[in-house]
Amino acid sequence: MHRKKDAGSAPPTAIRRRSIAVLGFKNLSGNPEKSWLSTALSELMTTELSQGDELRTIPGESVAQMRMSLAIPDADSYSQQTLNRIRQNLGSDDVVVGSYLPLGNGVLRLDLRMQDALAGETLATVSEKGNESEIDTLVGKAGAKLRAKLGIAALSDEQSAVVRTSLPSNPEAARLYAEGLQKLRLFDGLAARDLLEKSVALDPGHAPAHSALAQAWATLGYDDKARVQAKRALELSPSFSREERLLIEGRAHEILAEQPAAIENYRALWQFFPDRVDYGLLLIRAQINAGRGNDAESTLSDIRKLPVSEADAARIDLSDGNIAMSQSDFKRQQSSADRAANRGRAVGASLLVAEALQLEAIACERMGQSDKSAIDRERLAPCS
């Protein structure tokens, strides 16, 4: 039976949007119990700025891994040199940074600063106060001021509702979710699982929390438990925004080994947002897992036409290497992984470098050169 060719044959047309990364907020109180607010505020602000599709926001996962790779400290502003390193890693035109301070009686002050990542200039500053138990409202007010200063349309009631769904409605569940999400992004699956389990127990209707818990279980190797949470995330996903729903469903279908369905979700995401390299790479991953190497090749060819940062170029090379591995082309796998490692080193993306070295070591082993391990790779010439 003839199978319809996958998404690669109909590439989306990308219109480059200005990109922005919310880097997190400095906790001026010094109280570690308030540290979760940085992640929560960042999630809300990222969703706030993404609404209306005028800006391309950088995923929180990418930001967390960049901060770890580059050892970026918490700050309410950054030097031009630091901003350039961040731009090279994330491909972000602008960044949002700032700080927050509990003022007592449940009141929180939030100060935002938007900086040009290339020139280092401050483009806008915003200060707002609100209740800590209603940080979605606080971010909404601050975000409205920031959007006005940037000349971006104000949010509709429907878009504001989307922002509020970024966190669970229960304040304690929101805290646990934010803490769990941060642990998950830093590869601490065990701590993430414990926090996210408590979060979904308090607010069982929040699909992103179930999705994150499914990823935590999968990371720990508990596939059955991961599938239970993935199914629950699927059941709850229709009540969320189109973008969030497609992402939740794609991740769930991957965990459930329903790769054709995952392909459809990620293909839709990439068609709706064709300048989001990460969505294209998710599509490639699902195509590889489904055994559709030719479709993955076509998608990769379309992604290579996009203007990308050096870090994204390294991620694209990694995808190239994974496609090659799925086709038993180990020489190409080694070459692509080597390019990815070199590009990752150039921008200080240590996690990317580690992944590339692992992929290259597998290629070397498959070609009969098992002595070139990922650990030794830094000191040895590429295998041949």
Image (cartoon, rainbow, N blue to C red):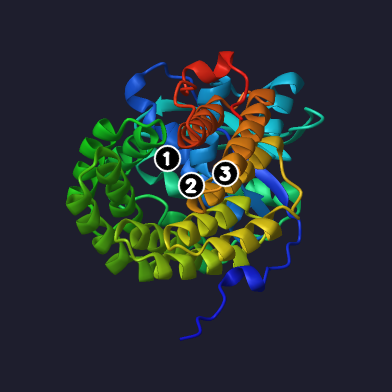
Residue at image location 69% in from the left, 24% down from the top: 346
Amino acid type, residue under disc 3 in the picture: Gly
Decide which of 374, 202 is in the foreground and name it.
Answer: 374
Name the side, left or right, on which 218 lies relative to 36: left
Name the side, left or right, on which 88 lies relative to 48: right
Residue at image location 29% in from the left, 61% down from the top: 256
Q: Is residue 300 above or below residue 71?
A: below
Q: Which mark is residue 123?
A: none
- Location of mark 2 (residue): 44
Name the side, left or right, on which 382 lies relative to 33: right
Q: Secondary structure at mark 2?
A: helix
Q: Nearer the viewer, mark 1 or mark 3?
A: 3
Amino acid type, residue under disc 1 in the picture: Ala
Residue at image location 23% in from the left, 53% down from the top: 203
Q: N-terminal of the two: label 2 or label 3?
A: 2
Residue 363 shows in this picture: yes
Q: CA distance from mark 2 to mark 1?
A: 6 Å
Local packing at callout 2 (Cα closer than 10 Å; few below 14, some 14-19, many 20+) is many
- Location of mark 3 (residue): 321
Amino acid type, residue under disc 2 in the picture: Leu
Residue 157 shows in this picture: no
- Quarter of the rendering occupied by the N terminus: bottom left
Q: CA distance from mark 1 to mark 3?
A: 35 Å
- Percent from the top left, x then y, of residue 276? 63, 54
- Location of mark 1 (residue): 40
Local packing at callout 3 (Cα closer than 10 Å; few below 14, some 14-19, many 20+) is many
Q: Are marks 2 and 1 in contact (CB under 8 Å)?
A: yes
Decide which of 73, 35 is in the foreground and name it.
Answer: 73
